[in-house]
Image (spheres, grey):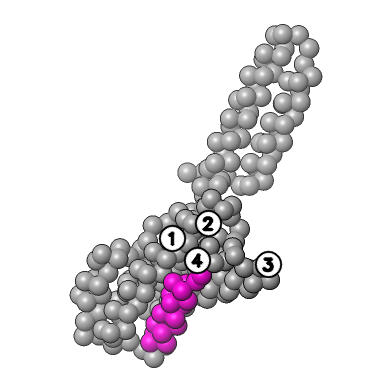
Amino acid sequence: MFSIDIIQVAILWCIAGSALICAINSRGVIRAVVSGLITAAIVVTAVFFSYMKYDSVKREIGLGETPSVPSSSSETMVENQAAKVSCSPVEKQILEEVIAISDSILAFPKLKYINNQDMEKREVFESKALSLRNKSMDSYRQVRGLFGPGDEKSCYYDLLLGAADNLRLAGYETHSLFGQENDNVGDSLNKAAVYAAQAKAVFLQLREQL
């Protein structure tokens, strides 16, 4: 699959705009029809490549990802993979931190309450949501950095990483509600709650087992 650079997409739209101007200024029926067909073809091409670039960017930032650890089977997986093992003090500290972040996301005020506050109070909530997003991302990076490329990973590492990824998505959805239209805000809050609850379930089981 070839890569599409955003500059190439922009050039395509510039060409499409120029073709549209030529089609509007063309004289004669035949010239107008031909110019219109050419313009339509260029626009369709630009739309196609724009969608491909958008899909690529969406995958890079993690939008639309499904939870890494299904909640229905998380407890069983933790018990099977984390039994009779121990973790380092650093891992225990990370576990405590991610559990606290999960609790903060789950306790984040509901949309109705936020909308009833004045602008200053809503800015406080937005700042808190940004902090939760940054903390969840930092925790995900910490988990990824627990083991180097050549190190042997513990048997529960994949579970911890999957739960940390869910927490990262929960933080992202919590903060994104302040940049969306009202029709989409409810979906972000629901997604954040689901991701955070799934992550917390795994974190708690790991803490009990380790």
Q: Residue at x 39, y 91 (%)?
A: 89
> Which of the two discs, 2 and 3, labels the residue nearer the N terminus?
3
Report the residue marked by disc 1.
190
Residue 36: image quadrant is: top right
Q: Amino acid at mark 3?
A: Met
| Helix, strand or loop under label 1 | helix
- Magenta-highlighted stretch: main secondary structure? helix
Kindly report which numbered mark, 2 or 4, lies closer to the viewer in this rendering: 4
| Stretch in magenta | 91-110
Q: Position of residue 129 (x, y in %)?
A: 56, 70
Marks 1 and 4, Cα distance to the nearest angstrom? 10 Å
Q: Position of residue 40 (x, y in %)?
A: 62, 24
Q: Residue at x 66, y 68 (%)?
A: 118
Marks 2 and 1, Cα distance to the nearest angstrom? 9 Å
Kindly report which numbered mark, 1 or 4, lies closer to the viewer in this rendering: 4
Q: Amino acid at mark 4?
A: Lys
Horizontal arrangement in the rendering, residue 202 relative to residue 148 (left or right): left
Marks 4 and 3, Cα distance to the nearest angstrom? 16 Å
- Residue 154 appears in the rendering: no
Report the residue marked by disc 4.
110
Report the residue marked by disc 3.
119
| Picture quarter with the C terminus | bottom left
- Residue 180 appears in the rendering: yes
Q: Is residue 105 magenta?
A: yes
